Image (cartoon, helix red, strand yellow):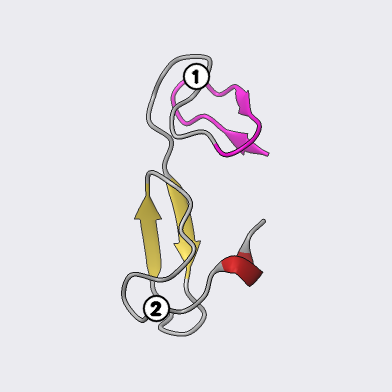
């Protein structure tokens, strides 16, 4: 479950924009290999810095 940072409503699924208010959703990924936090507007499968696989880190 994700809460929209703008309208505070629950967003289910992997939306790029909130279906309630239209704001662009921001997702944070923490890479366990390079220990960096990456903010994106979509779901990442690989770390853009070290190419680590994020598939096992999906919530």
- Please give the count of numbered marks on the rendered protein: 2
Quadrant hosting residue 9: top right
Q: Which residue reaches farthest top?
A: 20
- Residue 20: x percent and y percent? 53, 14
Q: Main secondary structure of the magenta part?
A: loop
> Mark 2: which secondary structure?
loop
Q: Are marks 1 and 2 in contact (CB under 8 Å)?
A: no
How far is mark 1 from mark 2, CA to CA?
34 Å
Can you tell which of label 1 and label 2 is closer to the viewer?
A: 2
- Residue 42: x percent and y percent? 43, 46
Label 1 packing within 10 angstroms: few (<14), some (14-19), many (20+): few
Image position of 15 (left or right of 49): right
Label 2 packing within 10 angstroms: few (<14), some (14-19), many (20+): few
- Residue 1: x percent and y percent? 68, 39
Q: Which residue is mark 1?
A: 7
- Which residue is depicted at the point 46% across and 55% down? 28
Q: Which residue is mark 2?
A: 51
In the picture, which quadrant includes the C terminus?
A: bottom right
Q: Earlier in the sequence, mark 1 or mark 2?
A: 1
> Mark 1: which secondary structure?
loop
- Residue 46: x percent and y percent? 45, 69
- Which residue is depicted at the point 55% across and 24% down? 8
Please give the range of residues in magenta.
1-14
- Which residue is depicted at the point 38% across and 44% down? 41
**Rendered position, 19 above or below 26:** above
**Rendered position, 30 above or below 22:** below
Image position of 9 (left or right of 21): right
């Amino acid at each position: 479950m994700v809460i929209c940072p703008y309208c505070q409503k629950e967003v289910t699924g992997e939306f790029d924009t909130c279906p309630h208010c239209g704001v662009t959703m921001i997702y944070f990924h923490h890479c366990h290999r390079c220990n960096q936090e990456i903010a994106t507007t979509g779901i990442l499968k690989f770390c853009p810095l070290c190419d680590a696989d994020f598939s096992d880190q999906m919530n």
